[in-house]
Image (spheres, coloured by chain):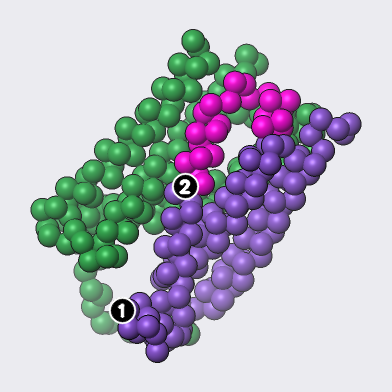
Chain colours: A purple, B green
Amino acid sequence: MGDGTELGRVRGLGSAHQGAEGWWHHKISAGSNLVLVLWFLLSIALLPAYDYPTISAWLAQPWAAVPMILLVVSVFYHFHHGLTVVIEDYQHDHTRFVLLLLLKYFTIATATLAIFSILKVAFTAGAAL
Amino acid sequence: MANVRNPARPLSPHLSIWKWGPSMAVSIVHRATGSGMATVGTILFVWWLSAMASGPAAYGAFVDLFTVSSGKLNVVGYIFGIGLTLSFFQHMASGVRHLFLDAGANFELGANKRTALATFVVAVVATSAFWLFLLEKSNG
């Protein structure tokens, strides 16, 4: 049982025992996505140029690399939940299990590649490649 | 789990039956834009980052796919660029609307229809402003 709020009262209920939690996490990541993606679009729009030296120097700054990593964590968590809901809505046979598994692999692999790339640029930009 | 249905039983009315309205459209578009960004957007985003991490040559090769020799976007660049930004602003606008709906607000029919239509207006205006700013900057 929860703390008397409507969300608290439904936590752990339902067939999956995690719907309320998932719904709440989706809302939290939606809020951080809103801030982080708007920051990203604004940063890109304000760049003086889009050649390699300019863009890598931008991403190498702590105040760009760290929000970018946070963006990856927040956005990828959010889309993982979103696509999970979509798959659960439309796939009712064994394809559901297969697609949910592929989604997990896809999300973790792309998130790891994205974060590694951000860190590599941040730690090596300006250094000899 | 087996998807066995007696074909003799009638199906309930679905998309081909209902008359479309703004509230229904905004819900479907929210799911479509989210799914599109999660797949196409993610692949392009990770490709862009990994190309940058691979150095100037790989980054140049990535950028070449979406630009002409002068550095301006080509047709492919515009399709993905405008498609993804429009998808984002649409998903963002209907996401913010969802926060109000989740709190139990905006269920009056007239007001609900107006906010549904407003998400499309916000998306088009924000996307136009973003691209006008970029084009002004590159041509100015």
**Do the residues marked 1 and 2 share a common chain?**
yes
Q: Which mark is residue B82?
A: none
Residue at 75%, 50% (x, y): give it: A116
Q: Which residues are magenta?
A: A35-58
Q: A80 or B16: which is nearer to us?
A: A80
Q: Quadrant of residue A100?
A: bottom right
Q: Which mark is residue A6?
A: 1
Residue at 51%, 40% (x, y): give it: A39
- Side (left or right) of B27 relative to A34: left
- Please report, as a chain letter, where disc 1 is located: A
- Side (left or right) of A118 relative to B71: right
Residue type at the position of mark 1: Glu
Question: How far across and how far down the image is residue A1, in percent?
Answer: 40, 89
Determine whether the residue tagged by mark 1 lies in a helix, strand or loop: helix
Residue B2 in the image: above or below residue B119: below
Q: Quadrant of residue B127?
A: top left
Q: Which mark is residue A35?
A: 2
Residue at 36%, 34% (x, y): give it: B126
Determine whether the residue tagged by mark 2 lies in a helix, strand or loop: helix
Residue B116 in the image: above or below residue A23: above
Q: CA gap, disc 1 to disc 2?
A: 27 Å
Question: How far across and how far down the image is residue A107, in percent?
Answer: 62, 60
Q: Residue furthest top?
A: B140
Q: A87 or A28: which is nearer to us?
A: A28
- Side (left or right) of A42 relative to B28: right
Asked if one can make out residue B35 in the rendered structure from this viewpoint, the answer is no
Residue B52 in the image: above or below residue A32: above
